[in-house]
Image (tube, helix red, strand yellow):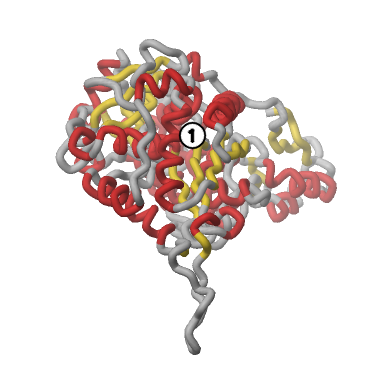
């Protein structure tokens, strides 16, 4: 993982979240107070009104209204004034928890390989993030704060800030996986359980950390809350648009982080970063959407503006595709990673995502058509344990539309004439990955492997196995070893990726 010191940070139209970054590499407590001033903690009712006035939305991708989220938690807790020790006959004790049991969770997991904005905040402005968490916790009447991160660098920074403030917060280090930031996976990890999304949806506001009402939101969201409380709604709304006030943090190309007012044209941000749009621009990350050059030139960085051109702001990730690399090859490479990095606990992930990879490889070689990929992307739509399979399918279908010309070349000749250079950011391999391979000198076409490993192997029309060719997911390692041991011809093996 790239250190945040290697990430260039800038702003368009004046800094808010990045205030002081031009003078300090990291804002410790004294610098933070000098730059942002003393912490102000409004009461719950006042805080909710401020958030509603500027329509503060989560910056983790879903864009859920923060006021509704904090009120959902407040509705599940009982404040000290609501004493139930002297209940009248026939009255029942409600199932709400005491306010001090509530938990505020800063979701600092940035599983997207192309995103660095939250790591930049955690390492360079940790006190701004903690201000937001403390504001929310105080409004809810609790002191329980958990910061979940997946970067050692971010963990060190936030622990140092917690020590400076002498606040009763704790840091939980998560695994570096694409699905680590999913709300259910974060809650499970904090609770010491398997860090994957739960198979049944459970609202954190009702039952989160330790079974208590939990307010969980993205790192930038808490930093925005701190800025809103400091500036007040009117001054906060002096940037952005009338419908969507404020600024937002963006990660451009996996190397630059920029703060820009909502409503800024996408082309303005790309020009500021000196990054050409290329054949297409990915907006919203690897669960986002592709915009061709025409749409990218029209796009405006707001929820409304992106919807107009068929895009999304998502988690603030913008990745222009470099000229000269094979677009279909790049898309296939990313989807292979997404299939490998799933939790592997539901059919749409275990079988649906590998099927998308298979059809993309076939399309790349000219032996499939786009409709084959669309059908594969539609398998299990809306039935996954989390949004991972649906987000991946959305990314793929968007690519089919954006790269129609390149796909047409592949369909005609099995190649577009360009190599896949791997320009879209992916995690650095840890060296332990392997691939399933077949010794064709031994294979007799028995086909048992395809029944044991349907996610990785399928039979062709002659009954011989076809290997998907992607790295073995961690959740399949036992299955692979079992298949190797059971192969009648001893033809199955694992080779280095």
Residue 470 image offset from top left, x and y in percent: 61, 36
In the orientation shown, which residue stands out farthest toward the top?
23
Identify the residue at horizontal 34%, vertical 36% (top origin). 224
- Quadrant of the image occupied by residue 270: top left
In the orientation shown, which residue stands out farthest toward the left?
242
Q: Does the image show residue 423? A: no
- Quadrant of the image occupied by residue 307: top left
Residue 361 image offset from top left, x and y in percent: 51, 37
Residue 370 image offset from top left, x and y in percent: 39, 44
> The C terminus appears in which quarter of the rendering?
top right
Identify the residue at horizontal 61%, vertical 27% (top origin). 152
Lateral position of residue 332 relative to residue 401, left or right: right
**Mark 1 residue element:** loop
For mark 1, what is the residue?
Answer: 112
Number of numbered discs: 1
In this view, 146 is above or below 162: below
């Amino acid at each position: 993982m790239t250190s945040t010191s290697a990430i260039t940070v800038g702003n368009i139209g004046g800094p808010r979240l990045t205030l002081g970054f031009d003078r300090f590499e990291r804002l410790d407590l004294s610098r933070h107070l000098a730059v942002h001033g003393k912490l102000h903690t409004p009461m719950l009712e006042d805080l909710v009104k401020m958030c509603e006035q500027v329509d503060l939305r989560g910056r983790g991708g879903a864009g859920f209204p923060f006021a509704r989220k904090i009120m959902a938690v407040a509705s599940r807790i009982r404040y000290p004034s609501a004493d139930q020790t002297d209940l009248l006959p026939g009255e029942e004790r409600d199932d709400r928890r005491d306010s001090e049991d509530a938990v505020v969770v800063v979701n600092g997991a940035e599983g997207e390989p192309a995103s660095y904005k939250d790591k930049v905040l955690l390492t360079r402005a940790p006190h701004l993030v903690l201000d937001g968490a403390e504001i929310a916790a105080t409004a809810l009447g609790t002191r329980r704060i958990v910061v979940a991160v997946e970067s050692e660098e971010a963990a060190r920074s936030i622990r140092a800030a917690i020590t400076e403030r002498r606040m009763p917060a704790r840091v939980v280090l998560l695994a570096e996986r694409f699905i680590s930031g999913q709300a259910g996976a974060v809650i499970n990890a904090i609770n010491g359980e398997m860090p994957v999304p739960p198979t049944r949806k459970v609202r954190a506001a009702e039952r989160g950390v330790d079974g208590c009402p939990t307010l969980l939101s993205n790192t930038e969201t808490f930093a925005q809350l701190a800025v809103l409380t400091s500036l007040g709604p009117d001054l906060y709304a002096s940037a952005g648009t009338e419908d969507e006030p404020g600024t937002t943090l963006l990660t451009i190309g996996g190397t630059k982080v920029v703060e820009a007012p909502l409503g800024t044209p996408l082309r303005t941000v790309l020009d500021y970063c000196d990054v050409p749009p290329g054949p297409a621009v990915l907006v919203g990350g690897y669960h986002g959407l592709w915009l061709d050059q025409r749409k990218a030139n029209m796009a405006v960085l707001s929820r409304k503006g992106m919807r107009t051109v068929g895009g999304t702001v998502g988690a603030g990730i913008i990745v222009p595709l470099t000229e000269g690399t094979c677009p279909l090859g790049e898309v296939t490479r990313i989807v292979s990673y997404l299939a490998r990095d799933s939790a592997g606990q539901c059919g749409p992930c275990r079988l649906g995502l590998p099927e998308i990879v298979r059809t993309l490889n076939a399309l790349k070689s000219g032996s499939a058509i786009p409709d084959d990929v669309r059908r594969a992307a539609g398998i299990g739509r809306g039935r996954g344990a989390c949004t991972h399979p649906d987000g991946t399918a959305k990314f793929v279908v968007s690519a089919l539309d954006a790269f129609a010309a390149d796909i047409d070349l592949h369909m005609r000749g099995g190649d577009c004439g360009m190599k896949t250079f791997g320009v879209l950011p992916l995690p650095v391999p840890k060296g332990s990955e392997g691939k399933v391979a077949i010794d064709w000198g031994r294979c007799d076409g028995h086909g048992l492997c395809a029944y044991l490993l349907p996610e990785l192997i399928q039979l062709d029309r002659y009954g011989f196995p076809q290997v998907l060719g992607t790295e073995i997911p961690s959740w399949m390692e036992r299955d692979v070893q079992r298949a190797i041991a059971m192969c009648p011809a001893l033809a199955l093996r694992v080779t280095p990726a």
